[in-house]
Amino acid sequence: MIKASELKITDIRFADIDGLPKHMILIKVFTNSDIVGYGEVRDASSATYAKMLKSRLIGENPLNVEKLFERIKQFGGHSRQGGGVSGIEIALFDIVGKFYKIPVYQLLGGKYRDRVRIYCDTDVDGKHTGKDMGKALKRRMEDGFTYLKMDLGIEMLLDEPGTLNAPAGMLEDIKKYSMKAICHQSGSIDKSLMFGKNYEIFTVPHYATGIHITEKGLDILENYVREVREEIGYEIPLAIDHFGHVAIEDAIRFARRLEKYNIAWMEDLAPWMLTEHYRKFAKNSCVPLCTGEDIYLAENFEPLLSAGVNVVHPDALTIGGLLQLKKLGALCEKYGVAIALHMAESPIGFMAAIHAAAALKNVLAVEFHSVDHPEWYKLVEPNIRLEDGFFAVPDTPGLGIDSLCEELITRFSKKDCPEPWAPTDEWNGEWSNDRTWS
Ligand SMILES: [Mg+2]
């Protein structure tokens, strides 16, 4: 058995998979022992964000998680850019847990709960009513889920005359170019969205679309929520995501109508960096406000917490990993804010979220997107098993993943990416002057 002080990182490799349902990038961090750490880059991202870190990590001792995180932190950023640093940090924790034969939650200070509540994002394809959505959510409840979230936003209104007003051509552009982005729950963001006119339309921020909702539009949206509540009742939490890119004033007008429907939270109503938009919403509505899946580093949440955000939904694969989640947990306690972990990734990202959720005090639930993909559960050994909408926190070492199912990884490997676990030697010599001060 190798001594702790002699453990070293020897290689880092990747596997891109797609179709379960999103593009997921799995990481293996190899060591000079038989221990391999598993990590993952954020969904719909690029392995490059992690590959560029490799030369800074080879030869280092993986047990020094915080020291290595401090070395690579400068190469992370918001949203998908956080995926490289975060994915490596999680793989290092997996190695530490496997080396010392203790579960990751124990490394984070122990657990607050033995099982973690899971919620699934639920959507209904195509034109449909609140009753249809209510029925879909009802099926989730019958499967045991105890916390619900649905998408509801202006895409419902795009074909309804007299419901939206906008600068001439804007609605047509959104329908033509960015509907794939609005309706992406069942798959991954398409490469075409990132280029040309698609990218231009896709990246217009909420306040600059010039879109406003008419009273008729608000009537239709409110009626949708009423129909959903008539199906599922008023005793189960119901959150709303993907309201659409409209000004915060319109989100406030809608939220006021929703107060009587007991909404658990409304999510990402403005780009998260626009703190003053969140402050305005919080001052003018009693519907809980949620953001955070695209924020890198715990410290960047604090302005929003002080602006009145009620729930944060950090992604372990964006915030910087598990220690950043613990730091965020402390900040959330200071401001009285609950945590609902964002999770749209493989069972590796899922297990990272589970260990964090076990070790954080004020957690509502962990998100889940793959309920309709039976192969997703089998990507790891032991397979992922939900019971009555909960997941039992494992007591096995590290993340609790013994091995990956290489047959499924090969079967679902993403076509335009290198073959799974291909050599990454070309990244061994990458370097720059990494000191961030002079
Ligand atoms: Mg979301």
Image (spheres, rainbow, N blue to C red):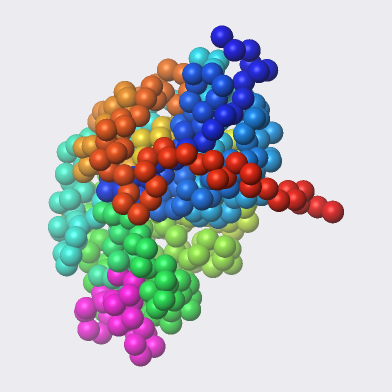
Q: Position of residue 319 (x, y in %)?
A: 55, 46
In this orientation, does residue 344 appear?
Answer: no
Left/right placement of residue 330 relative to residue 135 reads: right
Q: Residue 167: name its quadrant.
A: bottom left
> Is residue 165 shown in magenta?
yes
Q: Nearer the viewer, residue 283 or 39?
A: 39
- Locate residue 261, reporting x and y percent: 30, 57
Q: Residue at x 63, y 56 (%)?
A: 303
375 up-or-down from 168: above or below: above
Quadrant of residue 118 in the image?
top left
Residue displayed at 27% across by 48% down? 19
Which residue sits at x=84%, y=54%? Answer: 438
Relative to 82, say whether 175 is above or below. below
Q: Is residue 298 in the magenta section?
A: no
- In the figure, 31 relative to 356: above or below? above
Q: Position of residue 43 (x, y in %)?
A: 41, 49
Q: Quadrant of ligand 1?
A: bottom left
For the N terminus, the quadrant is top right
Residue segment shown in magenta: 157-179
- Given residues 425 and 410, the one toward you in this image is 425
Outermost residue toward the top in this view: 1
